[in-house]
Image: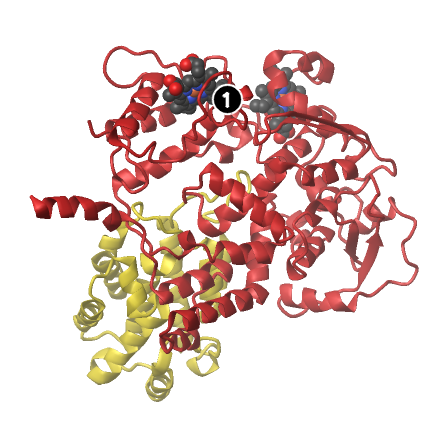
Chain colours: A red, B yellow
């Protein structure tokens, strides 16, 4: 009897995460920051250390050295390219842009000099390759693009020697280009970091019908983590990543492509339809800030608005802006932007599947601000977290289930986890991603009973009540089955312990 | 053909356990770019060419969705790695990529590298079975260390409970083929180790 009790007491600690061996941590650091395993010399140096503080100092040294390495810069640049979905295609366009477009210089500068992440949107000092004879669109070169916007094209190429060093590294040896600087004033309303580079504007092309909505939706996805898909039942496990085109099969470009341009291309017309407004009330005003930039940009700013519902404060944001420059600046001031960027870094360095609850997200957002939103500092913080140092676990099915339901519950949280009591309309605040649901077996069981009742699973012929029928968020069949299975397995928490015990 | 059979059987023998665990870990898999970078650092040009040929088939991130086509290394990835390593070793032997000119792989064979070179420079067709047990053991130990990491780390992953047994079984598997050349042995060891979870994830 006594030994059984002891066993039960020990059980939770047995399944708890354990810190990895320093060698494992070293490899993980090297692989996640640089992409390659540590060298033999590094492993041997670590082997010689025995005191915890020596090891700690050694690891800190590694982290800062790794973050200074060209491999890091290359790998991190890849991540940013992927974020914008600029991954190399075998086309002349990308061959041209790979490595020496104004977008590339801007991002390389940001990484190399550890500038604030906001510079992606705010930097207006563009560098253009003066040997740029390749056309990015029709007959235009990047030089033409910026030329048209500024009258400060230097007569003599302003060779940026410091940068040619950087190019040297990125292009593996042979190139050292002459660069022209196009410096726009920080207050220039027309310019907005990467958004006003030919790279971005040609990746997200505009048509008369599209009215820059594609560009706006890319901005929403990258900077506000709003992929505008929850309104449609998600068919894939990770609805955030669902490609928009998949949702509207039959249209090659977007769901609007098959519509009658006369009727649907008119923003006023479909803007009035409730279904369409769910996305278009925010897409269209943002799209307008790009309105004059099909490929070549207009010398005049184009007004629009930053309009969306904040998922942090739940307030309706509606800020008229005089141009894309002001739009970009306003975006960097939103909590939603900060939380979204934190999520990107979390996915990159800790893992998409690593559990992150609301509190952790808030703490990380605060940390991101504290370090001046500088990527290297934030990465260095993330890779020093205990969760990063955990021993690679072989998870039980129950533990995997618990991790897989979290992304679904995050969507439920958008109603159940509101900041103030007033917003809740008498409903109790409940962070569904925070498990276990309570301290006592009774509390936990009660909570799971509520969820199974709300979802209509379990005994009896229950009706599914959640998410509410009028909610824009709907559960996909797969998500529903996953939740059902989780409940049937006793609703295990992250340690794999069932929460329903009675 | 014979060598191919060996690769396949070895991958099967040693990786079946890792395969079974593929989905059941909290680990992250190296991106294909990472694998690409690693291979091109350690093996001659051929690898880069192979891996460059078709980035999307390899499982590089899809341009359309921005997310990886397959969250874990696909069968295609494994096949490509295999092809690439095999091709690289073929280049090892033949000019102008002869072994003496391969300068970038300093760490791949750990401490055994100079000795290995000595043997291969005098006899490119050297047989595995003709090498001394000490040399074979240190070669295997160094390669396991280089590719999978020190024992403590391998144990942390939990897929190989006893690293000594693992090294012994690697040796036994290669020893089963009396006519295998030293090159072929290196080649199959590299493939075997680089397609393991401990290498592909972190």
Q: Residue A290's image quarter?
A: top right
Q: Residue A408's image quarter?
A: top left
Relative to A152, does residue A277 appear above or below in the rendering? above
Relative to A408, does residue B101 appear above or below in the rendering? below
Classify residue A176 as left or right of residue A406: right
* Total tally of numbered discs in the picture: 1
* Secondary element at image label 1: loop
Image quadrant occupied by the N terminus of chain A: top left
Residue A343 can be seen, yes or no:
no
Image quadrant occupied by the C terminus of chain A: top left
Relative to A300, does residue A468 appear above or below in the rendering? above
A74 or A16, which lies in front?
A: A16
Give x and y (percent) for residue B101.
Answer: 48, 81
Residue at x-position 32% and y-position 51%: A17
Residue at x-position 21% and y-position 75%: B179
Give x and y (percent) for residue B64.
Answer: 55, 38
Q: Which residue is tagged 1?
A: A232
């Amino acid at each position: 009897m006594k030994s059984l009790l002891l066993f039960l007491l020990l059980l939770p600690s047995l399944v708890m995460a354990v810190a990895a061996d320093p060698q494992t941590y070293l490899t993980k650091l090297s692989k996640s920051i640089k992409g390659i395993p540590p060298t033999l010399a590094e492993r041997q140096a670590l082997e010689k250390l025995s005191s915890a503080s020596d090891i700690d100092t050694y690891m800190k040294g590694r982290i800062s050295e790794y973050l200074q390495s060209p491999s890091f810069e290359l790998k991190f640049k890849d991540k940013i390219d992927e974020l914008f979905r600029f991954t190399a295609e075998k086309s002349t366009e990308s061959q041209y842009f790979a490595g020496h477009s104004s977008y590339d210089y801007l991002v390389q500068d940001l990484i190399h000099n550890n500038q604030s992440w906001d510079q992606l949107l705010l930097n207006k000092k563009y560098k253009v390759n003066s040997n740029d004879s390749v056309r990015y669109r029709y007959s235009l070169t990047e030089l033409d693009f910026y030329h048209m916007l500024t009258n400060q094209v230097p007569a003599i190429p302003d060779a940026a020697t410091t940068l040619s060093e950087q190019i040297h590294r990125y292009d593996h040896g042979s190139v050292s280009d002459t660069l022209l600087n196009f410096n726009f004033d920080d207050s220039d309303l027309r310019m907005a970091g990467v958004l006003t580079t030919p790279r971005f504007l040609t990746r997200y092309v505009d048509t008369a019908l599209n009215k820059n909505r594609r560009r706006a939706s890319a901005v929403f996805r990258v900077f506000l983590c709003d992929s505008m898909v929850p309104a449609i039942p998600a068919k894939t496990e990770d609805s955030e990543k669902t490609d928009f085109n998949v949702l509207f099969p039959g249209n090659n470009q977007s769901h609007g492509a098959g519509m009658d341009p006369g009727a649907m291309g008119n923003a006023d017309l479909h803007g009035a339809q409730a279904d369409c407004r769910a996305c278009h009330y925010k897409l269209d005003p943002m799209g307008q800030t790009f309105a004059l930039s099909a490929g070549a940009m207009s010398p005049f700013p184009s007004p629009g608005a930053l309009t969306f519902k904040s998922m942090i404060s739940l307030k309706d944001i509606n800020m008229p802006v005089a141009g894309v420059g002001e739009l970009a600046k306003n975006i960097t001031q939103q909590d939603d932007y900060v939380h979204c960027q934190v999520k990107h870094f979390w996915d990159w360095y800790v893992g998409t599947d690593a559990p992150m609850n609301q509190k952790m997200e808030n703490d990380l957002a605060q940390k991101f601000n504290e370090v001046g939103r500088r990527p290297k500092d934030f990465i260095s913080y993330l890779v020093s977290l205990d969760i990063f140092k955990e021993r690679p676990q072989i998870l039980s099915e129950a533990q995997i289930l618990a991790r897989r339901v979290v992304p679904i519950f995050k969507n439920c949280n958008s109603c159940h986890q509101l900041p103030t009591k007033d917003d809740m309309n008498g409903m109790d605040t409940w962070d569904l991603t925070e498990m276990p649901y309570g301290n006592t077996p009774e509390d936990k069981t009660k909570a799971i009973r509520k969820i199974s009742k709300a979802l209509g699973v379990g005994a009896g012929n229950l009706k599914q009540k959640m998410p509410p029928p009028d909610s824009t968020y709907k559960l996909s069949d797969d998500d529903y089955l996953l939740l059902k299975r989780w409940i049937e397995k006793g609703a295990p928490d992250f340690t794999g312990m069932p929460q329903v015990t009675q | 053909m014979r060598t191919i059979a060996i690769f396949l059987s070895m991958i099967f023998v040693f990786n079946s356990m890792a395969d079974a665990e593929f989905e059941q870990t909290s680990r992250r898999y190296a991106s294909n770019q990472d694998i690409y970078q690693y291979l091109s650092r350690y093996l001659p040009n051929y690898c880069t060419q192979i891996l460059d040929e078709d980035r999307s088939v390899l499982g590089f991130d899809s341009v359309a969705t921005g997310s990886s086509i397959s969250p874990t290394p696909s069968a295609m990835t494994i096949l490509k790695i295999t092809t690439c390593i095999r091709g690289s070793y073929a280049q090892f032997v033949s000019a102008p990529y002869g072994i003496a000119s391969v300068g970038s792989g300093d760490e791949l064979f750990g401490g055994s590298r100079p000795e290995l070179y000595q043997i291969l420079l005098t006899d490119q067709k050297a047989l595995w079975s003709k090498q001394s047990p000490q040399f074979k053991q240190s070669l295997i130990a160094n390669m396991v260390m280089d590719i999978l990491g020190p024992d403590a780390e391998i144990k942390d992953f939990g897929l190989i409970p006893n690293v000594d047994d693992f090294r012994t079984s690697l040796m036994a598997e290669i020893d089963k083929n009396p006519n295998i050349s030293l090159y072929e042995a290196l080649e199959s060891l590299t493939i075997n180790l680089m397609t393991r979870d401990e290498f592909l994830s972190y």
